[in-house]
Amino acid sequence: MLSITEIQERLKEIDSSYQKETDTVKALLWAKLAALEVGGWTEECIDKIITDFVVAKNPPSRDKILERLNKIYGFQYNKDFRMIVVEIIGSILFDSIESKIDLQCQQLESALAALKDSRDVSAHTYTKPDTSIDAPSKMLELLNKISNGLTAFNAELYKLPI
């Protein structure tokens, strides 16, 4: 799993610049940057969790899984995360993990949905003074929830009898 330290520091710097900015559009650009950074970190973190697990548990599948990961461009809980993990370990084992860490999985799913909404606004809109974009501080909160959920899931993944 990727370290959260560097991205947390970067988000704190972005938030500081956002708070100091007096130009509305420039402040919105700082907010967009925060959403895009958390989205990028999340995608890379999920990829690393999957890759590390496959290398540890079934190295011959590595190339096939990497090829599959290269076709996933998101971080939605069911559409992206759950789908690739189920492809590797199966639905029964995924459900087993979810039942053990139900609250963390619910929080992860909720945080990923909120991040997707923020990231989509940031990535697919032209910035105007009346644009509504989540503040970098919200992205930092989402990052922490996502990291906590992925950390818990990753720990349970390695406990599977595979």
Image (cartoon, rainbow, N blue to C red):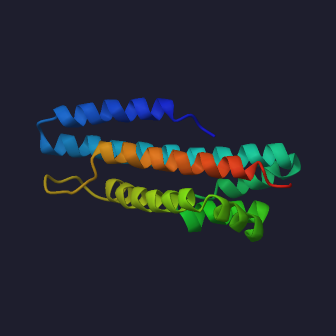
Asked if residue 144 lies left or right of residue 81, the reply is left
Q: Is residue 116 above or below residue 28?
A: below
**Residue at the spot 65% in from the left edge and 44% down from the top edge:** 48
Classify the position of the C terminus by image quarter. Answer: bottom right
Q: Residue at x 70, y 58 (%)?
A: 68
Whole-percent x and y of residue 79? 57, 68
Is 148 left, or right, of 130 in this rendering?
right
Q: Where is residue 45 in the image (x, y as percent from the top left)?
A: 59, 44
Report if residue 46 is visible in the image.
no
Q: Does residue 142 appear anywhere in the picture?
A: yes
Q: Where is residue 83 in the image (x, y as percent from the top left)?
A: 65, 66
The quarter of the picture where residue 85 lies is bottom right
Q: Nearer the viewer, residue 7 or 23?
A: 7
Along the horizontal axis of the image, is 39 left or right of 121?
A: right
User: Which residue shows up at 39% across the image and 31% down it?
Assistant: 10
Q: Which residue is drawn at 45% across and 57% down?
A: 111
Residue 21, x across and y down, in percent = 16, 35
Q: Which residue lies furthest to the bottom in this view?
A: 91
**In what quadrant of the picture does the N terminus appear?**
top right
The total number of labels drawn is 0
Write down the quadrant of residue 29 in the picture.
Answer: top left
Left or right of 107 in this view: 101: right
